[in-house]
Image (tube, grey):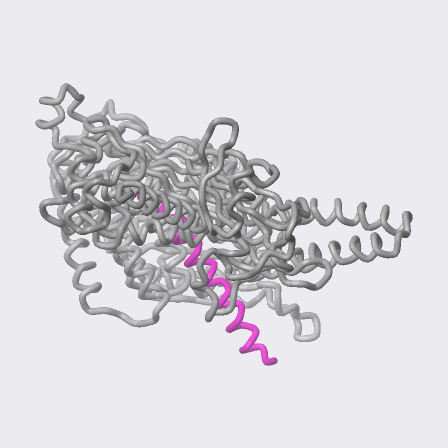
């Protein structure tokens, strides 16, 4: 592999890292804007939004993504004006910044695809003009305000950064990169290229005097320096921000357009350790058009440098020293305070340093290996039991315990807090509620509850539909709420918690609730239920999950209650989850989603039916009992009812359900399982106890097999099928209802 290939791989990896970081920064930016809308005086939140925009712009500049840089620069300017108090936060400003956030996302999508869209460019131009218009009143106000001699020190520093109108705005920048700059991931050329976006580079001189002989040269060491002349109307802070990521890996000296010859000679003293180097540097400056003829004695320049060093700064960070400028000590103080203001951010980076990014495919491979290890451990334990070797059996049991710990640890690596998914809905609630003219408060609790990463990504779409449904058809307008004796502001709550080895997610609102009578009438009209059929509230609420079922008078572009609920339920059940609906007319609706902790390895309960092994998720197992007397008196029935300590529950004979004859003519067992609020009994031939189950997907031709959710491999090498308990529960209840209806009809005829 050539060096060019190595460089291409490094650049591609860095580019991918930038896109991941930019995605995180966009989320932080959006979150900060939403907080700003409710609390505009939160300065730390404003700083967080500014840092996010600045990081995106700065890193995009290093990679040469000019479209991202140009647009984000406008956003950054507005955020800086907000921080300084030049403009005030408002609802229109927040809306425009949120649109800008979406535009930044579209520009980053173009980076991923590599194709530029003219419509996106036009949107950037329009939004950029709108952002610039926000700054015009602030600029005019600043220009019309007379200078106040009692202004605070920040105003004095700002005036020191200003360039007199009669001087051409050409800044001088001297860069001296440290030897480890390349090892730390910096590209000197990228910073110079980015400067070209801030202004026009008039002259660039490269210093190569520190480059060693070829035999002593280390390709990973940096020995370069640069002197640049930059023509720009930007202020010192804007230029210095270009090098924010390189502050610890280079010496930076920035001199203003009105800097004196003494300032340049002081810079020469700081950049060179010997007389020969200083002489070459002075000659270079003169070649770049700098006039050093009116320089003061060297002693004065040396004294200026000593004062700066004592103050803990360098001339690089100070404005040009002259009769009308601040003393170096004041600039040093301002520099130290700037460093202190950045301290919390540095602490945050230190915390982030404890985390590393891992490719998702590598993590999935680890989970697969752990799964195979679980199967191999079960096989070893089974072999030890067969050989009846106590010492070997004891060793396999120890291995089994370690494998279980490794399994739990590996699965824990894929667990992520669901709070990040919840916070995405703050923007949705804001935009949709404003579009509908409603005032809605979003409450989030249990955001630290962890869920498998694969399920977090899949559950986002069903949650989105439920949230939009509640906003559109659940929560009433303010006038209707006031007439009903409710507060004008509606409430939408997202809640997550652990319960019995599962994750519970609740979406609730305090709106008008589901209209029970209207749902039942619509179901009878469509023939889903009979006019004389008696259903409880839960069964009636579940009717809205039938395909195409809706009671809305008109379907909006936001949602239609019922439309798409079948898709929501199907997606949740595809994750081996269940969805329950609870509603009270006039008081709101709660949708409860129950999901397993993981989709890779579960604790199961193993049983046998007609010579075939089946696994039931352990968290759904309630208890095991002997087959009821009712079944023994009529063993040919596939389903029916039995009495469990005074409760009448349905049962399902798995052997007859799957079309097989039972291998046990005598005593059989009843496995009680629960799915949601429903409990049924599954009749099996033999119970074999708990079993660590590595879930294997079914082949495509078997994926729609009713009652089967997947497969696993036992320690003996046999295949066991994983039962789809919610589907079996629904089938059992439907069959039992139908049999009861037929029995009632026969009784009536008799």
Residue that appears at 37% across and 66% down: 112
What's the magenta region?
1-30
Most common secondary structure along the magenta stretch: helix
Dividing the image into 4 quarters, which one contains the C terminus? top left
Q: Is residue 35 above or below residue 553?
A: above
Residue at the far top: name it. Answer: 485
The answer to whether any part of residue 139 appears in the image is no
The answer to whether residue 2 is magenta is yes
Q: Is residue 417 above or below residue 723?
A: above
x and y percent of residue 678 in the render? 43, 38
Q: Is residue 386 above or below residue 678?
A: below
| Displayed quadrant of residue 423 | top left
Residue that appears at 51% across and 69% down: 699
- Horizontal side, residue 185 vs residue 228: left or right: right
Residue that appears at 25% across and 45% down: 544
x and y percent of residue 726 in the render? 44, 47
| Displayed quadrant of residue 463 | top left
Query: Between residues 196 and 711, which one lies in front from this camera angle?
Result: 711
x and y percent of residue 622 in the render? 55, 36
Residue at the far bottom: name it. Answer: 2
Residue that appears at 80% across and 46% down: 397
Q: Is residue 146 above or below residue 680?
A: above
Query: Between residues 572 and 544, which one lies in front from this camera angle?
Result: 544
| Displayed quadrant of residue 561 | top left
x and y percent of residue 576 in the render? 46, 50
């Amino acid at each position: 592999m050539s060096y060019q290939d190595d460089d291409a791989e490094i650049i591609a990896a860095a580019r991918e890292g930038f896109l991941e970081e930019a995605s995180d920064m966009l989320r932080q930016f959006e979150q900060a804007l939403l907080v700003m809308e409710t609390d505009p005086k939160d300065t730390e939140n404003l700083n967080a939004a500014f840092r996010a925009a600045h990081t995106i712009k700065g890193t995009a500049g290093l990679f040469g993504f000019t479209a991202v840089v140009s647009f984000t620069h406008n956003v950054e300017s507005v955020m800086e004006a907000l921080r300084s108090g030049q403009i005030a936060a408002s609802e229109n400003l927040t809306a425009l910044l949120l649109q800008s956030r979406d535009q930044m996302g579209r520009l980053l999508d173009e980076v991923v695809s590599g194709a530029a869209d003219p419509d996106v460019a036009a949107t950037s131009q329009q939004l950029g003009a709108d952002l610039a218009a926000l700054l015009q009143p602030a600029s005019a106000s600043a220009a019309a305000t007379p200078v106040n001699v009692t202004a605070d020190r920040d105003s004095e520093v700002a005036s020191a950064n200003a360039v007199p109108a009669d001087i051409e705005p050409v800044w001088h920048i001297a860069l001296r990169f440290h030897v480890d700059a390349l090892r730390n991931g910096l590209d000197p050329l990228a910073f110079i290229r980015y400067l070209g976006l801030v202004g026009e580079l008039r002259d660039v001189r490269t210093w190569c005097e520190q480059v060693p002989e070829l035999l002593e040269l280390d390709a990973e060491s940096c020995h370069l320096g640069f002197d640049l002349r930059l023509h720009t109307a930007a202020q010192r802070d804007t230029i210095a921000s270009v090098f924010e990521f390189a502050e610890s890996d280079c010496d930076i000296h920035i001199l203003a357009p009105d800097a004196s010859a003494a300032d340049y000679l002081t810079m020469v003293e700081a950049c060179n350790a010997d007389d020969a180097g200083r002489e070459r540097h002075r000659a270079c400056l003169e070649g770049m058009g700098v006039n050093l003829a009116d320089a003061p004695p060297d002693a004065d320049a040396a004294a200026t440098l000593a004062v700066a060093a004592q103050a803990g700064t360098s001339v690089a960070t100070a404005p040009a020293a002259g009769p009308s400028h601040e003393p170096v000590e004041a600039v040093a103080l301002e520099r130290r305070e700037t460093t202190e203001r950045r301290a919390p951010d540095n602490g945050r980076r230190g915390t982030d340093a404890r985390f590393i990014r891992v490719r998702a495919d590598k993590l999935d491979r680890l989970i697969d290996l752990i799964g195979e290890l679980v199967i191999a451990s079960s096989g070893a334990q089974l072999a030890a039991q067969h050989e009846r070797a106590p010492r070997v059996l004891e060793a396999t049991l120890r291995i089994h315990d370690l494998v279980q710990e490794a399994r739990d640890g590996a699965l824990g690596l894929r667990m992520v807090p669901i709070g990040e998914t919840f916070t995405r809905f703050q923007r949705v609630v804001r935009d949709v509620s404003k579009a509908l003219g409603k005032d809605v408060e979003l409450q989030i609790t249990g955001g630290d509850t962890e869920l498998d990463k694969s399920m977090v990504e899949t559950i986002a779409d069903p949650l989105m539909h439920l949230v939009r449904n509640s906003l559109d058809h659940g929560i009433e307008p303010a006038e209707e709420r006031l007439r009903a004796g409710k507060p004008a502001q509606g409430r939408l709550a997202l809640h997550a918690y652990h319960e019995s080895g599962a994750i519970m997610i609740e979406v609730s609102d305090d709106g008008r609730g589901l209209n029970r009578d209207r749902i039942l009438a619509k179901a009878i009209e469509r023939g889903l239920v009979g006019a004389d059929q008696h259903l409880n509230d839960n069964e009636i609420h579940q009717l809205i999950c039938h395909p195409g079922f809706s009671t809305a008078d008109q379907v909006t572009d936001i949602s239609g209650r019922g439309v798409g609920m079948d898709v929501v339920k199907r997606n949740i059940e595809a994750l081996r989850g269940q969805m329950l609906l609870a509603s009270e007319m006039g008081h709101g609706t709660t949708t409860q989603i129950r999901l397993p902790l993981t989709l890779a390895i579960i604790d199961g309960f193993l049983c046998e039916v007609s010579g075939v092994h089946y696994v039931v998720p352990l968290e759904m197992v309630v208890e095991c009992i002997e087959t009821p007397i009712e079944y023994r008196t009529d063993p040919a029935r596939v389903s029916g009812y039995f009495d469990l300590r005074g409760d009448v529950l349905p049962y399902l004979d798995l052997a007859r359900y799957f079309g097989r004859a039972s291998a046990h003519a005598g005593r059989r067992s009843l496995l009680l399982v629960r799915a949601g609020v429903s409990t049924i009994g599954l009749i099996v031939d033999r119970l074999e106890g708990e079993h660590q189950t590595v879930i294997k997907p079914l082949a495509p031709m078997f994926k729609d097999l009713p009652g089967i959710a997947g497969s696993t491999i036992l320690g003996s090498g046999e295949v066991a099928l994983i039962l789809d308990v919610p589907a079996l529960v629904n089938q059992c209840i439907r069959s039992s209802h139908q049999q009861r209806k037929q029995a009632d009809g026969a009784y009536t005829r008799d």
